[in-house]
Image (tube, helix red, strand yellow):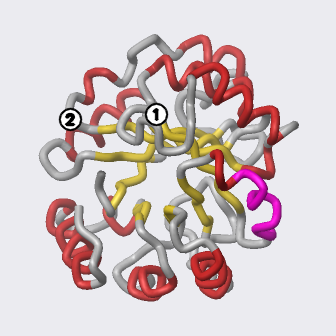
């Protein structure tokens, strides 16, 4: 499993395919940001131009199977993620990130995930994992009761999620550090505002996976930028 996770905010299936092609041979893991335009906006593929029901219906089974050696993580920045999980799992996602603030009934969502997929924390880390994301302003007490039933926590470190290139919010650093001290064995990833400048502070705070968007896609050389992030992670004892 990689430490550096490129994030794709696709405007269309063609845009997704084009970006995945660029990542072939560079990474083994990718995060697809799925935004419904309701929880946050603007919408991204497959929601762009469709209602949530239409968007989910358009997802084909094994739609991500062509990725081959690339594992697909889907960040569900959507209202009612309960309704979306099954479609993305059938499409081939092997990691599902749910924003804890969006769940109608978080305990039930997690229980249904376990019941439907036979999921137990860490049972098939390379097949299907469940993580909870929380925003900068959200207290970790929202997710702490469920840590024994999920695989990772994703801290958002920007104030306006669902967009790439947003400024890093340093308020997340003490929050991550405190959480890591309290739960040292829980895998922590961070999404939003991750750059070569902000990454060292995040790694020192206890982050084990960095989800990187604009810092990769806006770089003059994508492969070189990915290598620079990887070398930085190696410096802090994390390896791809």
Question: In this rendering, is residue 123 above or below 139?
Answer: above
x and y percent of residue 71 in the render? 32, 38
- Which residue shows up at 20% across the image and 45% down it? 22
Element type at mark 2: loop
Q: Which dot marks residue 69?
A: 2
- Which residue shows up at 26% across the image and 29% down it? 67
User: Quick one: 199 or 51, which is closer to the camera?
Assistant: 199
Tag 1 residue: 128
Q: Which residues are magenta?
A: 139-146
Element type at mark 1: loop
- Which residue shows up at 80% across the image and 41% down it? 106
Q: Which dot marks residue 151?
A: none
Question: In this rendering, is residue 50 above or below 124?
Answer: above
**In the shown orientation, is residue 73 left or right of residue 131?**
left
Q: Is residue 24 magenta?
A: no
User: Quick one: 147 or 235, which is closer to the camera?
Assistant: 147
């Amino acid at each position: 499993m990689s430490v550096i996770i490129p994030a794709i905010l696709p405007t269309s299936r063609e845009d997704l395919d084009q970006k995945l092609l660029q990542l072939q041979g560079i990474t083994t893991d990718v995060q697809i940001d799925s935004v419904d335009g309701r929880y946050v906006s603007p919408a991204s593929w497959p929601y762009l131009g469709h209602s949530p029901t239409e968007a989910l219906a358009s997802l084909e089974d094994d739609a991500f199977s062509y990725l081959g050696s690339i594992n697909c993580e889907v960040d569900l920045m959507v209202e009612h993620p309960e309704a979306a999980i099954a479609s993305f799992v059938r499409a081939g996602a092997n990691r599902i990130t749910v924003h804890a603030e969006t769940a109608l009934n978080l305990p039930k969502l997690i229980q249904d995930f376990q019941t439907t997929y036979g999921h137990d924390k860490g049972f098939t880390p390379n097949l299907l994992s469940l993580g909870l994301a929380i925003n900068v302003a959200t207290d970790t007490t929202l997710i702490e009761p469920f840590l024994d039933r999920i695989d990772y926590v994703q801290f958002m470190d920007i104030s306006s999620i669902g967009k790439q290139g947003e400024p890093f919010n340093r308020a997340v650093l003490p929050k991550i550090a405190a959480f890591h001290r309290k739960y040292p064995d829980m895998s922590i990833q961070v999404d939003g505002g991750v750059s070569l400048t902000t990454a060292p502070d995040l790694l020192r705070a206890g982050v084990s996976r960095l989800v990187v968007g604009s810092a990769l896609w806006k770089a003059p050389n994508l492969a070189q930028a990915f290598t620079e992030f990887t070398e930085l992670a190696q410096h802090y004892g994390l390896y791809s």
